[in-house]
């Protein structure tokens, strides 16, 4: 295919010389190259074989899927960070609760006593 041969021209001036030798203009080559990139041009040399290049619609879909993938990766990273933080906070609260239980003084229940007004005072006689 002419475009394949044109792409092989790497030295300075070789592409122009190739176009002259084949008898076409560089504008025609650029047009064909654009059509090839857009998936509109198929090679006759490869008749019967499938064209594996992406069409414009496929390129747009691929860009959209890649963008979605990046967004989902960012959401996943944020979610994993949140889970990590919640796990650390839970462990901290658990440790604080255990520490508080270990250091709290034990309060004894008061012994039952008679109220002062029921206790007889010494030196007074009852009627």
Image (spheres, helix red, strand yellow):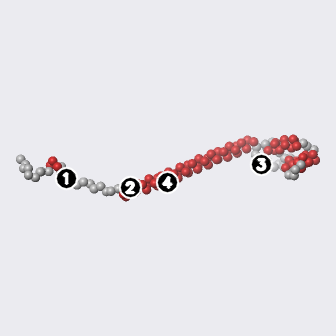
Circles 3 and 2 in contact, beta carbons < 8 Å: no
Disc 1: which residue: 113
Circles 4 and 3 in contact, beta carbons < 8 Å: no
Q: Position of residue 126 (x, y in %)?
A: 7, 48
Disc 3: which residue: 52
Between discs 4 and 3, the one toward the N terminus? 3
Q: CA distance from mark 3 to mark 1?
A: 97 Å
**Which residue is at a point 68% across and 43% down the rendered structure image?**
64
Q: Position of residue 36 (x, y in %)?
A: 81, 44
Q: How many marks?
A: 4
Between discs 2 and 1, the one toward the N terminus? 2
Q: Position of residue 5 (x, y in %)?
A: 87, 50
Circles 4 and 2 in contact, beta carbons < 8 Å: no
Disc 4: which residue: 88
**Which residue is at a point 8% across and 52% down the rendered structure image?**
123
**Which residue is at a point 64% across and 47% down the rendered structure image?**
70
Q: CA distance from mark 2 to mark 1?
A: 32 Å
Q: Position of residue 60 (x, y in %)?
A: 71, 42
Between discs 1 and 4, the one toward the N terminus? 4
Disc 2: which residue: 100
The reply to whether residue 5 is in sight is: no
User: Position of 43 compared to 57: left or right?
Assistant: right
Q: CA distance from mark 4 to mark 3?
A: 50 Å
User: Position of 48 compared to 72: left or right?
Assistant: right
């Amino acid at each position: 295919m002419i475009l394949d041969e044109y792409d092989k021209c790497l030295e300075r001036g070789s592409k122009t010389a190739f176009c002259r030798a084949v008898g076409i203009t560089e504008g025609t080559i650029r047009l064909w190259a654009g059509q090839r990139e857009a998936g509109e041009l198929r090679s006759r040399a490869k008749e019967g074989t499938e064209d594996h290049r992406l069409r414009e619609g496929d390129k747009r879909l691929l860009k959209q899927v890649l963008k979605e993938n990046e967004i989902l990766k960012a959401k996943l990273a944020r979610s994993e960070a949140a889970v990590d933080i919640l796990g650390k906070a839970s462990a901290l609260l658990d440790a604080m609760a255990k520490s508080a239980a270990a250091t709290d003084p034990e309060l004894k229940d008061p012994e039952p006593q008679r109220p002062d007004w029921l206790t007889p005072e010494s030196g007074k006689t009852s009627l």
